[in-house]
């Protein structure tokens, strides 16, 4: 669910970086993951991960509100640890990955909450439906250099969506009340960004 989620988290660390110019950062797919959690039978929570996350954040350190981020999540890589369930989730009842293999997020507004916390508002597109969402982002206070000479920042982004808003409406009612699958989906994105070298 989440191209959305992804770029935003990385954004958090970038906001705190001290630099006089705007800079471009790329999401590191090897160290970035998008996870989701949804209630099952109203008694437990099923958790899973999406596929590869890619994207770019353009950070304006002088005026963070002029920053932007775009991200894409490969839904074909969805994994809950149960093959039959994963097959169902990838099918027409849920994500319909054969027709909609990607989830995307494009920011529209960035706001600073504190030195390490931000909100990023943007458009999330799932199954061809686009809705505005707000990501709560918390990031590392400053960039670091990895052993290979790359400049890195990281963070975490969280949001909650109603799956039915995006056309994912499958569900069955229980005799005792409630439903098999909940509507609210919690999304968490752990992200690592690499500064693009000029």
Image (cartoon, helix red, strand yellow):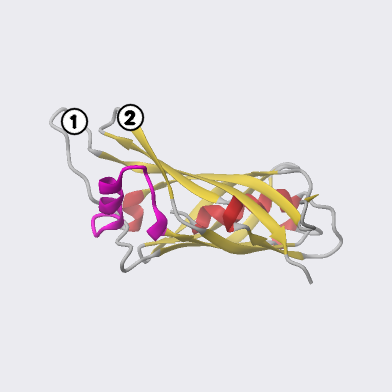
Residue neighbourhood size for the residue with mark 2, other residues' Cα within 10 Å, grouped as few (<14), some (14–19), many (≥20): few
Residue 66 relative to residue 98: left or right: right
- For residue 186, above or below residue 150: above
Where does label 2 land, which residue?
44
167 or 37, nearer to the observer: 37
- Find the residue positioned furthest to the bottom: 198
Where does label 1 land, which residue?
177
The x and y percentages for residue 188 are 51, 44
Q: Earlier in the sequence, mark 1 or mark 2?
A: 2
Which residue is located at x 23 percent, y 55 percent? 93
Residue 13 relative to residue 18: left or right: left
The x and y percentages for residue 120 are 60, 53
78 falls in the magenta region: yes
Q: Which residues are magenta?
A: 75-94
- Find the residue positioned furthest to the front: 148
CA distance separating discs 1 and 2:
15 Å
């Amino acid at each position: 669910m989440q191209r959305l989620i992804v770029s935003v988290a990385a954004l958090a660390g970038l906001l705190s970086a001290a630099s006089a110019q705007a800079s471009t950062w790329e999401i590191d797919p090897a160290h970035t993951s998008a996870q989701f959690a949804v209630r099952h039978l109203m008694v437990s929570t099923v958790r899973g991960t999406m596929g590869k996350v890619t994207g770019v954040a353009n950070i304006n350190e002088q005026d963070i509100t002029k920053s932007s981020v775009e991200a894409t999540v490969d839904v074909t890589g969805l994994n809950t640890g149960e093959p039959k369930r994963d097959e169902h989730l990838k099918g027409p009842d849920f994500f319909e990955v054969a027709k909609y293999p990607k989830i995307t997020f494009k920011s529209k507004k960035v706001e600073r909450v504190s030195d390490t916390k931000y909100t990023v508002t943007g458009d999330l597109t799932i199954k061809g439906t686009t809705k505005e969402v707000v990501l709560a982002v918390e990031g590392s206070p400053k960039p670091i250099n990895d052993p290979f000479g790359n400049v890195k920042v990281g963070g975490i982004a969280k949001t909650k969506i109603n799956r039915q808003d995006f056309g994912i409406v499958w569900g069955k009612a229980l005799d005792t009340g409630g439903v098999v699958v909940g509507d609210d989906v919690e999304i968490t994105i752990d992200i690592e960004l690499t500064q693009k070298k000029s």
